[in-house]
Image: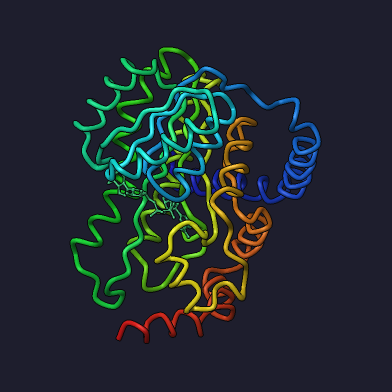
Amino acid sequence: MSEVLVKLQAFIGLIGLAAITPLLILAAILSQLIGKLCCCSKSKSIEGEVAVVTGAGHGLGRAISLELAKKGCHIAVVDINLSGAESTVKQIQESYSVRAKAYKANVTKHDELVELNAKVVNDLGPVTVLVNNAGVMLHRNLINPDPADVQLMLDVNLTSHFWTKFVFLPPMKAMRKGFIVTISSLAGVFPLPYSTAYTTSKAGTMAHMRALRMELALENQKDIHVTTVLPCFLRTNDEITQLTHSMAIDDLYPLISGEDVAKRVVAGMLRGEQEVTLPDLASVLYRLIFLLPTEWQARIILMLSSKRFKQLRDMQS
Ligand SMILES: NC(=O)c1ccc[n+]([C@@H]2O[C@H](COP(=O)([O-])OP(=O)(O)OC[C@H]3O[C@@H](n4cnc5c(N)ncnc54)[C@H](O)[C@@H]3O)[C@@H](O)[C@H]2O)c1
């Protein structure tokens, strides 16, 4: 086809899309509203199934493990810090009658995850729920970050999701069912200056899960659900809480508790929601901001927060 014809075809396609977009937006809003009204009936059961939760020895991972156990799911509590994982197991066993076991594994190491899967299948059974929660935000030197810190954030927050996918997804595909929950961050859509490795890792994670969802649809794997979670700052990690407090982020929006996030995440996962934004309203906010030209998007984010980001930079210099 000639170049002129290809350009003309693309132009006509664009005009057509622009013309039907208002209708598509209306249909999307209606289907979201109907979905919300009928959500309870669509919730799936995971009673008796086995979940692997990474980074479950502390914070949000621990809260999600407890919430999954409440739904009757057996839990493989995975962390690089075994004593944290063991204390999560203790908390699960004190409250619920499901099986739970602590495993030490580093999610950045593919071979450790292969070994982990074999142990979990042997101890608890085949894994049908994977929660990619382990994550790190290092802010030791924001202006000139140590290359090792940048590498670690990308390895834990982004690359590890390829290794967990390689290990846990093929058996789910063979069983034709499963849930993959990946904890990203609002930083994936509202970039954080001076935390570019963290921002990149979280935006990449969201893109990874969007592409994976399409692959599953192309393979007709309708019963494998992928949920990405984009939370605002949480009250799960003392260091982050201190940092957000010194930047007065909690004046913009109160930090959310791990338990509240866990409830919303597990409910969303069981309803097959694709992206859960916390607070929920932030998803409307970022979609509205994305309608604006790029320079306006940055201007609006800086209008709200430039004082805070400068404060963060100055704290470090
Ligand atoms: N805390 C926040 O404000 C916030 C906001 C948005 C998103 N998130 C994301 O939520 C998730 C949980 O955050 P959190 O605040 O509960 O963190 P946390 O630091 O309290 O817990 C993270 C856990 O992951 C474990 N971990 C770290 N590296 C690991 C590795 N290589 N292998 C296995 N385990 C490892 C740690 O030992 C720890 O137990 C992370 O992905 C984080 O990026 C956090």
Q: Is residue 298 above or below residue 25?
A: below
Task: Using residue 292 as the reference point, say whether residue 201 is left or right of it.
Answer: left
The quarter of the picture where residue 106 lies is top left
Point out the image quarter for the N terminus.
top left
Residue drawn at (24%, 76%) of the image: 144
Q: In the displayed structure, does residue 105 sit left or right of residue 40?
A: left
Q: Residue at x 37, y 84 (%)?
A: 315
Q: Would you place residue 79 above or below residue 165 in this image?
A: below
Q: Pinpoint residue 195: horizontal percent, then vertical percent.
A: 37, 68
Q: Residue furthest front?
A: 94
x%, y% of residue 120?
Answer: 33, 22
Instruction: Give the position of the C terminus as an image quadrant.
Output: bottom left
Left or right of 197: which side holds 227?
right
Q: Is residue 28 above or below residue 238?
A: above
Count of numbered circles on the image:
0
Residue closer to the observer: 111 or 237 = 237
Which residue is more in the foreground, 274 or 233? 233
Q: Which residue is the extreme one toward the top?
A: 175
Tell which of 140 and 275 is nearer to you. 140
Instruction: Look at 37% across and 82% down and name the residue there.
Output: 313
Q: Residue at x 74, y 41 (%)?
A: 32
Could you say which quadrant of the image residue 310 lies in? bottom left
Percent x, y of residue 129: 46, 27
Q: How is the image coloured?
A: rainbow
